[in-house]
Amino acid sequence: MVNGGISFWFADDGLPVVREPLTGDASADVVIVGGGYTGLWTAYYLKKAAPSLRITVLEQKFCGYGASGRNGGWLYNGVAGRDRYAKLHGHEAAVRLQRAMNDTVDEVIRVAAEEGIEADIHKGGVLEVARTPAQLARLRAFHEHELAFGEKDRELYGARETAERIRVADAVAATWTPHGARLNPAKLVKGLAAAVEALGVTIHEATPVTEIRPKQAVTPYGTVRAPYVLRCTEGFTASLKGQRRTWLPMNSSMIATEPLSDAQWEAIGWAGRETLGDMAHAYMYAQRTADGRIALGGRGVPYRFGSRTDNDGRTQRETVVALRDILVAFFPALAGVRIAHAWSGVLGVPRDWCATVTLEGSTGLGWAGGYVGSGVATANLAARTLTDLVRLDSGEAGPTELTALPWAGHKVRKWEPEPLRWLGVQGMYATYRTADRREQLTHDARPSRLARIADRVAGRH
Ligand SMILES: Cc1cc2nc3c(=O)[nH]c(=O)nc-3n(C[C@H](O)[C@H](O)[C@H](O)COP(=O)(O)OP(=O)(O)OC[C@H]3O[C@@H](n4cnc5c(N)ncnc54)[C@H](O)[C@@H]3O)c2cc1C
């Protein structure tokens, strides 16, 4: 089994040739820090809107090095913080955000097709299953809750209908939305970087930004000056000067099996290639890959003391074992399957678990992120929002539907200093795991008090 190597997606498709680093001071109209989906989509839409803009992307390693090249490939309509935005700005504002997210799934698919980005995209929707009475109660509540946010096309399945789609052991029900697609994350980010470059955006890789100041991105090789400096660094944000407690870097880990045999696929079903999730507190997410594997993820060791992030995506042995156990519990026919690759990456988690997009007119500093685990589609909507905010601030365009979304300009307090930060996150995940185990053993359908307490401690509700 390969462990690390950035991700299975990069190992399979090949690591990119790293672009030239910055070689001295430079200037631009917009400088973007971070070459993941957020940074690249922002460069894409800004350049499309105003082709004469001089845009420079600065990436510490190579485009897709972060979560954008390592994720589960769920391009779906979930957005971190929607329910809190409903409380803060009213239900209608949150519905607008949700509708924009539904459309974003199709927007990514549209641009990928237009730009000739072949990212193994298959729009089969999102299927989430319940395997215990408590999960069933949560699934029903979740289903109703999503309908209330305007998802008229969501469907609820019983055990038999679920099994017709996919045979997950003990599955008693499922909820399905059409607003989701599976994709190969590394192919998307590579293709996007190439498309952006072809439009005339300058990308410097192997160029770490050490500090962001108003109108300046500082690197060891020189400073890029621009009226707008946009921070798109998600789980790595804590390593920037002054940003240690802004977004907590949280790990998520994945495994990919060897390609399964026809007989194994026969036993499992999954012809619709929906992205697959469950209703456990420490939830799993999975996809059927284009080459017939299962790629499955979940929380590993969630958070490293002092907001440290990893190097090459290596993950702990216990995490690999835990993910393999989930795989086999879901699909007993895979008891003997070989795991080909394991890896991990970092998410960005704000103190209130709400994704945000902000541009400060006074300093020209902007940022987008804090997507928690839902960034593949969200980064596209965030990038379009950030684009519109820059164009509004520079007087190039007026307010738009996107600049009026409730996440624009949302402010959130910082995380606690260590060791409280570490203790809080470790405690939250230990509690989720205990709640899951208890629900499995007792078959108790009541919502777990333990999990509710963990949510509150972590600032989720
Ligand atoms: C294992 C895993 C599975 C996931 N699964 C899903 C999923 O299935 N669906 C979903 O919706 N979301 C998923 N996510 C979340 C999603 O991948 C992210 O939210 C999304 O990719 C964030 O994109 P980004 O561009 O904001 O951040 P990133 O992709 O992390 O990009 C940030 C970039 O900035 C660069 N950078 C950082 N600091 C600096 C600096 N100082 N100087 C220069 N460059 C810098 C990094 O090298 C990196 O390339 C998953 C995440 C992980 C880790």
Image: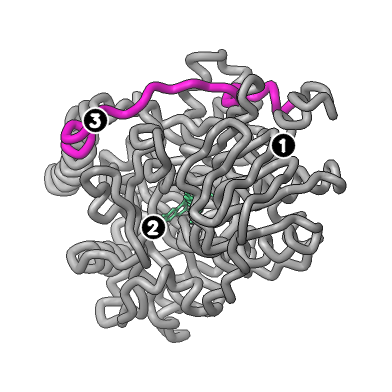
Tell me where residue 206 appears, x and y as whole percent: 52, 63
Q: Nearer the viewer, mark 3 or mark 1?
A: 3
User: Is residue 406 on the magenta stretch?
Assistant: yes
Residue for badge 1: 387
Q: Nearer the viewer, residue 340 or 392?
A: 392
Q: Quadrant of residue 329?
A: bottom left
Residue at 24%, 43% (x, y): give it: 306
Specify the segment rendered in magenta.
Answer: 401-423
Task: Kindly tell me whether residue 106 is visible in this rendering.
Answer: no
State whether label 3 is within 8 Å of ligand 1. Answer: no
Amino acid under label 2?
Gly
Q: Which mark is residue 417?
A: 3
Mark-to-mark CA distance, 1 and 2:
27 Å
Earlier residue among tags 3 and 1: 1
Residue for badge 2: 345
Q: Which mark is residue 54?
A: none
Amino acid under label 1?
Thr
State whether label 2 is within 8 Å of ligand 1. Answer: yes
Tell me where residue 372 appears, x and y as whole percent: 43, 41
Q: Nearer the viewer, mark 3 or mark 2?
A: 3
Q: Secondary structure at mark 2?
A: strand
Earlier residue among tags 3 and 2: 2
User: Is residue 455 on the magenta stretch?
Assistant: no
